[in-house]
Amino acid sequence: MKIEKLDLPEPAIEFLKSQGFEKLYPPQADSVKSGLLGEQSILVSAPTASGKTLIAMLAMLSYLSKNKGKVIYLSPLRALAAEKLSEFKKLEKIPLGNKIKVGISTGDFESLEKNLEKNNVLILTNEKMDSVIRHGAEWIEEIGLVITDEVHLIGDESRGPTLEMVLTQLKRLDTKPQIVGLSATITNSDEIADWLDCKLVKNDWRPVPLSEGVCDAGEVTMSNGKTFEIERSLRGTPIDLGVQSVQQGGQSLVFAETRTRSKSLATKAADAVSQILEKKDLTELEKTSKKILSQNEHTDLVKTLALLVKKGVAFHHAGLNQKCRETIETEFRKGTIKLLSSTPTLAAGVNLPARRVVISNVNRYNAKVGANRPISILEYKQLCGRAGRPQYDDYGESIIVGNGNTEDLIDHYINGEPEPIVSKITDDKSLRTHVLSVIVTNPGIKKDEILEFFLQTLGGLQSRKPTIKFAIDISLRFLSSEYLIVKKGERYAATEFGKKTSMLYIDPLTATYFRDAVENVSQDRSHPFGFLHLISNCEEFFPKFSLRNKDYESASLLIENNSSELLEPISEYDCSRSLLALHAWITESSELSLSDSLGIESGDMHRMAETANWLSYCLREISKHVERADLLEELDNLRKRIVYGIREELLDLVRVKGIGRVRARILYKHGIKNLNDLAKTPVDKLAEIDKIGSTIADNIKSELRKVRY
């Protein structure tokens, strides 16, 4: 099916052709034949890189050329949402009758951006959409098209229930929006399609054919029966496989089960890959290496990464900060980095295909059982789906590293069916959270109506009615006993505390934990360490790192030195390494120090600070609700200290844009301790201070005027 034959306005056709689209891929053609452009709801179940983004674009262009409503694009991750923003922003150039305006919102669940509704294409994370629904935004009734990416994540324990709730709410809208679900190949796609009232479009076509195999003792056996040898070395099988692909002109993506192993595998590959590189690649990589060193503190992790990048290899995991990860992703896409060793989170996070994907181990550490467990077939299919770069490769290969079990691995993973998607909505945490949100958005709702709503979820389709009814009863009892909801006759309504909890987007259990803690806080002292302990101890705090044997002494000393700030007595066994890191951060420990002393890397510290900022805001709002106004200023200050990583005496200086933790401390050491001191300091004297200079000094003075007047 050719682009020019599509039932779309001429400007849309011309735009698509200008972007290089001439002919539809089979899954795209099937979607059009199934009524995509006629506002038929569809669920597309197709492999990675089979052109699902164009399906989304076609639906958008068709809808917006005929309607004045809004298009919602739901993404499971911020990184994916950001990728889509850059792609969909191009649509704004198309002169349709309704001017296309694309916006994005992925954070701050407690508030609604004022200008969000001015866009007619909105890219939102699933959590942000859930928050929008809880806040009762008026423009929800204008939604005419919902595109939901990575629908298979509905089976994910942490993210799945929110997506399930959002889709249940959206398909119940009076406007009956068209739903376009985009999913990896899943076994029960027909069941998911039935639940969403969608027509199923299932197609296993890929633009780059994929062959899958297992390597054992140097011999690779592919699923089609073909075999070949690899040259074995002391580097180990995963890297021998990766290097072979680079030697043949491809790129390799090696999935490792842990961060430590991802770094180790990249290190082993470095010398072999560097010998294959051309001079122009080496020149580019030298620049990238210097860029990494110039933008980051020189922790061991950063120095190792910069050294490896020079040789055309890199590792990628959550310990790296955003700058490092983006640099690595950019260079891998450009093709200068030839071999990338990564933890599996990359497979779900960003679009980084390679000619050969190597799965170095099918086992993963499972925190629930405290031991290694084999990955699911669905996760395996997600990993191997990264093999084959459209526009670059004629084929893609995915190879599992085996251990005398080739036939079993081929039978289970390569020939096996992915596990069916199972709803997690009836888990205790998700049910109490979402039962509360249903009551908040439907004041005066009866128990039968709550049950009727949850029977319309995927969990309602997959479970027995008595099972869901029993689970809802437990949630209602908890919410009532903690005074988050009240019952009048047969009807339920949220209390002010219940409404606040739902709008704050936290687990009701965390809200009650915070409420009970702040109600009993003493008035005659400050509590920063106690609040950090409270925050890092709750269910939502992430990432959590437990103490190592060598950390107990530090934890004990920290408790002893800050005992007056605690909300209740604790011992070192009540501490986590995350608590130690947060305290070190707000007392101005450097990233280098955090890495060396606590093994906390920059990426982890950033996510901890981000989570702690949100939770300290929730704590402040709950303190306000329970009329502890005496705690508000302290919690405001704590939030700023978490955001900037500073001691209390620098709070005044960081109010000025352009002054962060490093510059604020330098200014303080030069006797500039507050905004008055800063105002009195002549601009030429300011420029002479280390890490300031004339341009920054001028900017600081300009920003200072905005703060003071």
Image: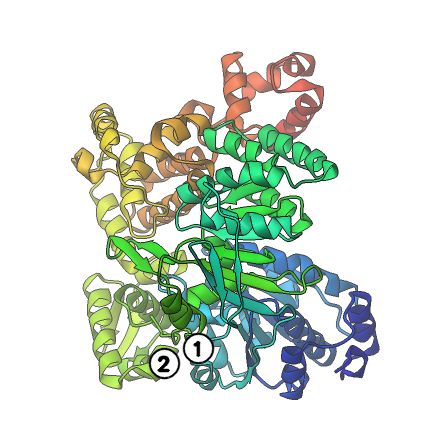
Is 684 drawn above or below residue 95 in the view shown?
above
Q: Residue at x 29, y 72 (%)?
A: 426
> Quadrant where the N terminus lies?
bottom right
Residue 209 is drawn in which quadrant? bottom right
- Please provide percent x and percent y for residue 508: 29, 59
* Mark 2 crowd level (few <14, some 14–19, many ≥20, 10 Å Cα): some
Judged from the image, the secondary structure of the residue bearing numbered disc 2 is: helix
Q: Earlier in the sequence, mark 2 or mark 1?
A: 1
Please name the residue shown 36% across and 74% down the image.
422
Q: Which mark is residue 453?
A: 2
**The one of 130 and 635 positioned closer to us in this rendering:** 130
Alpha carbon distance from label 2 to label 1: 8 Å
SS for tag 1?
helix
The circle on residue 168 is 1
Q: Are marks 2 and 1 in contact (CB under 8 Å)?
A: yes
In this view of the protein, can residue 597 be seen by the observer? yes
Residue 95 seen: no
Q: Which amino acid, by three-letter code, is at mark 2?
A: Phe
Q: Position of residue 326 (x, y in %)?
A: 59, 45
Under mark 1, the amino acid is Thr
- Image position of 369 (left or right of 182): left
- Residue closest to the eye, 90 or 216: 216
Residue at left 61%, top 19%? 691
**The C terminus, quarter of image:** top right
